[in-house]
Image: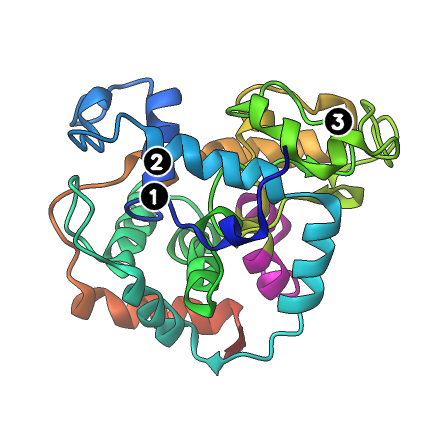
Amino acid sequence: MKASFSEKEINPLQSIEQWEDDVLVRYPAANQPAKAKEEYRNYEDTKRESVKEFYRLNHTYQSYDFVTEKKNEFLKFNRKEMPVWNAMEFLNTLVDDSDPDIELDQLQHLLQTAEAIRRDGHPDWFVLTGFIHDMGKVLCLFGEPQWAVVGDTFPVGCKFSDKVVYPEFFSHNPDIDNEKFNTKYGIYSHGCGLRNVTMSWGHDEYLYQITKDYLPEPALYMIRYHSFYAQHRENAYEHLMDDHDREMFEWVKKFNPYDLYSKNPVPPNVKELKPYYEALIAKYLPSTVKL
């Protein structure tokens, strides 16, 4: 039985960051983080049911037609125009009191990610990528439900892999019965390259489309595919990749630990860091971005 349209408005997660901590449980760091993974998101009575419900909605509605519709809707970039730093502050309005792990706002979390990258001596465009990689979550501020903003990403237009988290929920997706889309390759071909593959919709694809004319290609791969865990952790879509994708995914794999494991209860000094990041933004991005 297909889910009803009204369910599209449900936001089951206590916070949009909850799905990332579920990823951390699924893929713990090689060196255990400061907090044991079982301690993360210790909501006494949810027992991860909200995460499960999140993926039920995500897998039900993320069809090829849905992604096409969202691209047509949001890639006009006609909602707001502002400097990148202001966009990051705009993102802060997503913060609520429901996160039991850390009390940092979104801007501080992104600064922690970027500062960890900078401390390890990576190129400045890599540092900038760490700083802005979640900026696409402003989609929530435009009324989008959580399941259309965050979550593991995956190709649409071909058979859904059983390596994607909670694959059983794809049974309600309309593409499952579409002969064009429900075979291994679907509308694609062997080794066609991810540039020719349509991914599920969310903050990754949205930010990629905003920045694609400005950042080095490795940065764009990090932004576009950092939530594509079925590939960079499970190699589930190797048949769609080409050699260039494989080369670029080495950068995605370098970025992933900074994205997942850089949370720290000690807040960065935003006032001190702001001049550095504003100069870095100015080096690579236009004075204002359209959202």
Quarter of the image that includes the N terminus? top right
Q: Which secondary structure class fits the magenta region best?
A: helix
Does residue 92 appear in this view?
A: yes
In the rendered image, residue 128, in percent from the top left (x then y), is placed at 43, 57
Kind of residue at disc 3: Lys
* Magenta stretch in the rendered image: 206-222
Residue topped by disc 2: 50
Which tag, 3 or 1, sits closer to the chain's start?
Answer: 1
In the rendered image, residue 42, in percent from the top left (x then y), is placed at 18, 30
Residue topped by disc 1: 13
Which tag, 1 or 2, sits closer to the chain's start?
Answer: 1
Which tag, 3 or 2, sits closer to the chain's start?
Answer: 2
In the image, taking residue 133 as reference, residue 224 lies left or right, namely: right
Residue topped by disc 3: 159
In the image, taking residue 172 as reference, residue 111 lies left or right, namely: left
Q: CA distance from mark 1 to mark 2?
A: 5 Å
In the image, taking residue 39 as reference, residue 82 lies left or right, namely: right
Does residue 255 appear in this view?
A: no
In the image, 220 versus 109, the foreground residue is 109
Q: CA distance from mark 3 to mark 2?
A: 26 Å
Kind of residue at disc 1: Leu
Disc ID at residue 242: none
Above/below status of 28 relative to 212: above
Above/below status of 64 relative to 256: below
**Helix, strand or loop status at disc 3:** loop
Circle 1/circle 2 CB separation < 8 Å: yes
Above/below status of 282 relative to 190: below
Q: Residue at x 43, y 79 (%)?
A: 83
Q: Does the magenta segment cover residue 269?
A: no
Q: Residue at x 51, y 34 (%)?
A: 56
Q: Residue at x 72, y 38 (%)?
A: 174
- Image-quadrant location for residue 157: top right
